[in-house]
Image: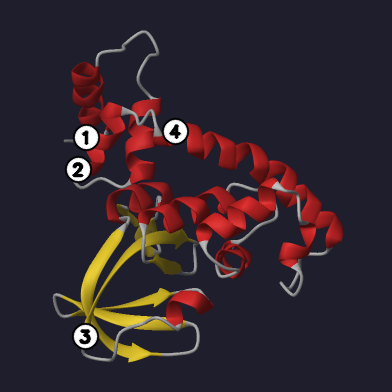
Amino acid sequence: MALGWSPDGLNFDFNWKSIYNRLMISYLQGKIILKKDKFVILEVAGVGYKVFLNRQNLSRLPEIGENLKVFTFQNVKEEALDLYGFFTYDELEFFETLMDIRGVGPKSALDISALGSLDKIKDRILKQDEKIFEGIPGIGSKKAMTIILELTGKIKMLGQKKGSVDEAEGALMQLGFSKQQAKDALSRIPGSIKAPEERIKLALKNLGK
């Protein structure tokens, strides 16, 4: 955020990408203080976080007053910062994959992630079963097939990446950076640099550390 003076008074110039990179919340652990139909509020260090969950995870929540751990996706808009929570990192990764598809927003992605177990959803998509999306608002048969076609390749890539995790990316995440922050920082490093130690060092410089 840049703060300056203009004839009309203070001038605030918000750089939303900068805010996103610096304040991204990727994990929360805290006490449940409120449960609603679409979200839960977690108290973490005296601060309440509103976290949207899918129907499946909402039905599995502990009681109010108990602790909950969630991996989170932070959806940044000019008018709001929304958090979407998941019980496992694999669920979060699948949600992020859905968000990469044109025309799929966070609400549709959350509805899709509640269609059953993650393995079952992936299996039906790989079988090109367009009926899996029946009942989800805004997803007709044409859009369903588009999503399936795009997801099929992405799911196969996810499976391949499980066996070949980027060492530098993993190290940055262990240092507390989100997966997206790590990816963004590493993407700015020349491809000619292969050594994990050097890539981590350069990525930390890109992250301002």
Find numbered disc 4 in the image and state the secondary structure of the residue it sits on.
helix
- Indicate which disc residue 66 carries: 3
| Residue bearing the label numbered 1 | 171
Q: Earlier in the sequence, mark 4 or mark 1?
A: 4
Q: Amino acid at mark 3?
A: Glu
Quadrant containing the C terminus is: top left
- Indicate which disc residue 161 carries: 4
Q: CA distance from mark 3 to mark 2?
A: 26 Å
Q: Residues within 10 Å of mark 2 (few under 14, many from 20)?
A: few
Q: Residues within 10 Å of mark 3 (few under 14, many from 20)?
A: few
Q: Amino acid at mark 2?
A: Gln
- Indicate which disc residue 16 carries: none
Q: Is residue 152 above or below residue 143?
A: above
Q: Earlier in the sequence, mark 3 or mark 2?
A: 3
Find numbered disc 3 in the image and state the secondary structure of the residue it sits on.
loop
Query: How far across and how far down the image is residue 75, in percent?
Result: 47, 61
Q: CA distance from mark 4 to mark 1?
A: 16 Å
Q: Is residue 153 above or below residue 19?
A: above
Q: Earlier in the sequence, mark 3 or mark 1?
A: 3
| Residue bearing the label numbered 2 | 174
The answer to whether marks 4 and 1 mark residues whose Cβ atoms lie closer than 8 Å is no
Q: Nearer the viewer, residue 172 or 121?
A: 121
The answer to whether marks 3 and 2 mark residues whose Cβ atoms lie closer than 8 Å is no
| Quarter-of-image position of residue 182 | top left
Q: Amino acid at mark 4?
A: Lys
| Quarter-of-image position of residue 103 | bottom right
Find numbered disc 1 in the image and state the secondary structure of the residue it sits on.
helix
Q: Residue at x 52, y 59 (%)?
A: 118
Q: CA distance from mark 2 to mark 4?
A: 18 Å
The answer to whether marks 2 and 4 mark residues whose Cβ atoms lie closer than 8 Å is no
